[in-house]
Image (cartoon, rainbow, N blue to C red):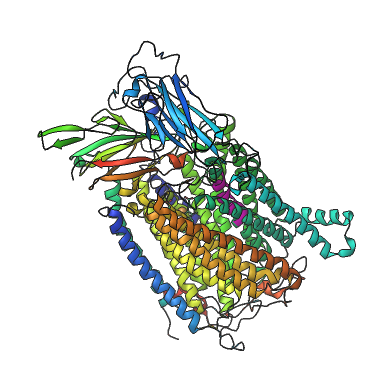
Amino acid sequence: MNKNRIRVISLMLVIFAALAATPQITSFPTGAGTNGNNGCTCHAGGAGTTTVTVEGLPESYVGGETYELMLTVSNPDIPGADISTNMGGFRLFASAGTFGPGENSTDLVQEKEGGATHTELGNDFRTWNISWTAPDNEGQIVDFTAHGNAVNGNAVTPTDGKGNTGDAWGSFETSIPGAAAMGGGVALIEQAEPFEVAIAAITFGISLFSLMLVYVFYRNNPDGFNINGLTTWLKKWLTTTDHKEVGTLYFVFSFLFLLIGGVFAMLFRLQLAVADNEFLTQDQYNSFFTLHGTTMIFLAAMPMIAAFANWILPLQIGAKDLAFPRINAMGFWMLVGASVLLYGGVLAGEGADISWTMYAPYSASSGEKGASAGTTLFIGGIIMLGISSTLGGVNFIATVMTMRAPGVTWMKMPLFTWSVFVANAMLYLSLPALIIGTLYLFLDRTIGTHFYDAAAGGDPILWAHLFWYFGHPEVYVLILPAFGIVSEVLATSAKRSIFGYRSMVYAMAGIGALGFIVWGHHMLTSGMDPTLRLLMMITTMLVAIPTGVKIFNWLATLWGGSLVFKTHTLWALGFLVTFTIGGISGMFFPVAGLDVHFHDTYFVVAHFHYVIVGGTIFGMFSAIYYWYPKATGRKLDEKLGLLHFVITFIAMNGTFWPMHQLGIEGMPRRYHTYSVDSWTELNTFITISAYIMGIAQLILLWNLIRSYKYGEEVGKDPWGGWSLEWTTESPPPTPSFHEIPTQGDANEHEHESSSGGLFSKMWKGVEAK
Amino acid sequence: MGPAEYTIFWDLLETWNFWSIIVGVFTFALLIFLVIRFRQISPTEESPDKIVPGVFPKERDNLTLELTWFIVPTILVLYLTFVAWQSMISVWVDPYSEENDIDDFEITMEAYQWGWNFYYHDDIEIYDPETGNYTYFVTPEGTEIKNETVSYDLYLPCNKLIKAKIRTIGDATTAPVLHAPFLPEWAIKEDAVPGLETYIAFTPRETGTFDLFCAEYCGQQHSKMMAKVYVVGVC
Ligand code: HEM
Ligand SMILES: [Cu+2]
Ligand SMILES: [Cu+2]
């Protein structure tokens, strides 16, 4: 047997041994269906047959006016006639206005936490009189929700602690517009429907975008400005397979969606600016934050990474193109299709409202209280995204494995290429979990399977496992390329070679491996087996070590250099600050006593924005300023760049730093509004900072457009970088090199032991120099 | 604001803040020093590594340094893991195990879209110094809090280990979805999972009115799925 075979077999044995050692860990300790089969039946008896009606509601209300309402509960299976006591109860809420007891009902009906409910005495009825005073603002729509219970006469008699058996709940919902919201009222800004604002902003954006395209086309060749010329030009872009052009498409796409995702953030930050705000309805808020998260991760950050990977990776390894140009183009166009599916629901007014984590069973539910109708399309879009990313991943892995130019060996590969390679390997291994999970979800929603339905024997936590098995590697897919970019930018700006190249690569590989065994840290409060929680806590803590190694290697890179402050340098230094903060706050979660408080609060929101905005997005911005000259032959304006950096950096911290405090105070995330007045101050501050940050991105947009025409022209290597992309023209020809280049090596004449690197030194010991 | 002072949360947060500040200050001080000390003074400065396009530059590493910033963080992380471990025992120990069979107060929290039912399996008795009798605690709505009652807000006695079972209901009118009772005052939460009974345990040590939020996104009125927690009696 040859050595390789022995290695493979022993590796398999180790894996089998590990698998055999872990059967005591079950993700779902007591199994599904305990309640469904023999447990609680309370509030279930007669369900569905109870009807609740509310009479006396006006068609549209007059501000400040009081209305007399009558709420009735009836159930043909539990007629009230034969019962005299304990017949029923109710709860009535409205999104605005105040309640009180109605005519002759002071003993029977009471106000409670802004809603109305029956009193103890009121239990003996099925009809109640309630008064409702409309809010002064006539410009809104008030939502009413009533829950009614037709009790069969049983007093509260929990049998073996399982609760009342005599209940039968039903509910009722309606919405009533104020006189002004009916139309014809004064058009206040408050009255604008946020959905319409969002759609108008998107439509406006897309129109501007199309105009821009036409303008770019015109500038390209003013003489050929006719419809024939336009179609040929468009056709070229629609059918291109050149890695640079597909990269440009990815970039334009991601920037557009960065702005659209920003519009959603602006809308819901306005909603959160003050306590008890009603600017957005709950449904709007829910689908806006869902679309915001999904857009930012899948349609902005990932495609922007893909843009730079497409553009730069082949240049860095001296390849003329990617390994599978057509698959590459197909990946991009699948992404465009996916974005249409994701947004289909919003444009129809029924945007998916399941959050970017898409937790089942809610995301599998439908109907009145279930996920909104746009969810099915949305899930379809996610499946398509998965396919698109898989195609992209295959392509990058194959390219790096097979198309490196002479001299570009594994351990002489630029770090950006390394990072894209590791990221795509991770993506490639984790995506199947997401695709399978979303396929199950799609089947649950469309043909009625029950993968996530506990009552039918499905597993409601299965989704969380599948999602985070993908989701945690995914966050490293987002950050690794930024690591790569920062490594390149810092080294170039300090005019040094990167410190500890090998340990950088090992750290990346270490993060890549560890990243697969920590997913449970997102589920520490999900009812998962404590053994698994413990395991995931420890592994999560360990991730900090390779991350720390990278940070110190970057710092050491600056040592003894002569650092120039170009805009991309500023972004990379900004990255060091904000990413370090995000990494430190990540260390708070693997601690049980902290995570049971922080999970799903604004502390988590602060953490991942520090790593994703302060990490990934800052890295990408650095890359924009760094490689724009390579792609266009012109530099971006440094003054505008400085302005953009300073405003964004300050506003970013102003937006996300106070969220730590809100999290400590216990503000839950994904909340449409909050009633704790002391949270208003910080939230107002956050909203203002968020607007400043949002608007500052227009500076970048303007810079990108303006410099294309007026930027300072550059040669092959404007910043003094060493990797192969700086040896070809700016912009590069197609195919990207006239002939395949050969990468030299400044270490060639060093004697053996020092080129052996960290590990061989560890074996041999450090030799005196 | 934030969790009660006597919770384990603050001890841990203090430890973690302490180490975060040490790591943060060290890193940022180093960063600022390097940026200022090694900035470019004149544009003609030569690179010590002679960067040439198309040539892999001279490798730089230093085993001692690299091992230092591998080993020191490792020790810190191991130490923190050890500290965290203890909190795991106190937060996730099974409150229904035999050794926890102390003076406790058992309830069941039932989550539905969108609200809470609290079932009591023990009584809250209030001592009346005038009559010298114990009476059941009575809510403003007139419900006596004793074994087998249900309430929409939560009433808890002081200084007892509260053992709460958590479950969901889902039927034709409310979808069976995830929820999570979150009690910021005691810095604790756990998901309510359809088909699974989960639990939390905590001990209130001060009377007062506190919030209970739903912390697991559960649909339209997730943000309205709140209740008040009243800790009553004497402490
Ligand atoms: C030192 C490294 C890190 C550690 C120890 C860490 C730890 C954690 C933990 C435990 C959570 C779950 C918190 C909870 O929900 O209770 C979390 C959430 C999150 N982290 Fe990290 N993290 C680290 C770095 C990163 C990086 C590099 C990224 C992305 C670039 C990232 C992105 C996220 C995101 C998106 C979430 C929120 C997921 C959600 O929607 O619930 N983290 N992190
Ligand atoms: Cu994670
Ligand atoms: Cu909820």
Main secondary structure of the magenta stretch:
helix
From this viewpoint, is residue A481 visible? Answer: no
The x, y position of residue A208, in whole percent, is 73, 56
Up-down relation of residue A59 to residue A489 (above or below): above
Q: Which residues are magenta?
A: A287-300
Up-down relation of residue A287 to residue A766 (above or below): above
The x, y position of residue B2, in whole percent, is 34, 54
Image quadrant in which you'd find residue A309: bottom right
Up-down relation of residue A65 to residue A319 (above or below): above
- Horizontal arrangement in the rendering, residue A264 relative to residue A96 (left or right): right
Say which quadrant the N terminus of chain B sits in. Answer: bottom left
The x, y position of residue A674, in whole percent, is 44, 47
Task: Depth check: give the residue in front, A64 or A685.
Answer: A64
Q: What residue lies at 9% left-to-right and 34% top-to-bottom? A: B132
- Horizontal arrangement in the rendering, residue A213 relative to residue A348 (left or right): right
Up-down relation of residue B174 to residue A534 (above or below): above
Image quadrant in which you'd find residue B179: top left
From this viewpoint, is residue B19 visible? Answer: yes
Q: Is residue A144 magenta?
A: no
Q: What residue lies at 44% left-to-right and 21% top-to-bottom? A: A73
Q: What residue lies at 88% left-to-right and 60% top-to-bottom? A: A225
Q: What residue lies at 34% left-to-right and 62% top-to-bottom? A: B16
Task: Depth check: give the residue in front, A395 or B23.
Answer: B23
Q: Is residue A295 magenta?
A: yes
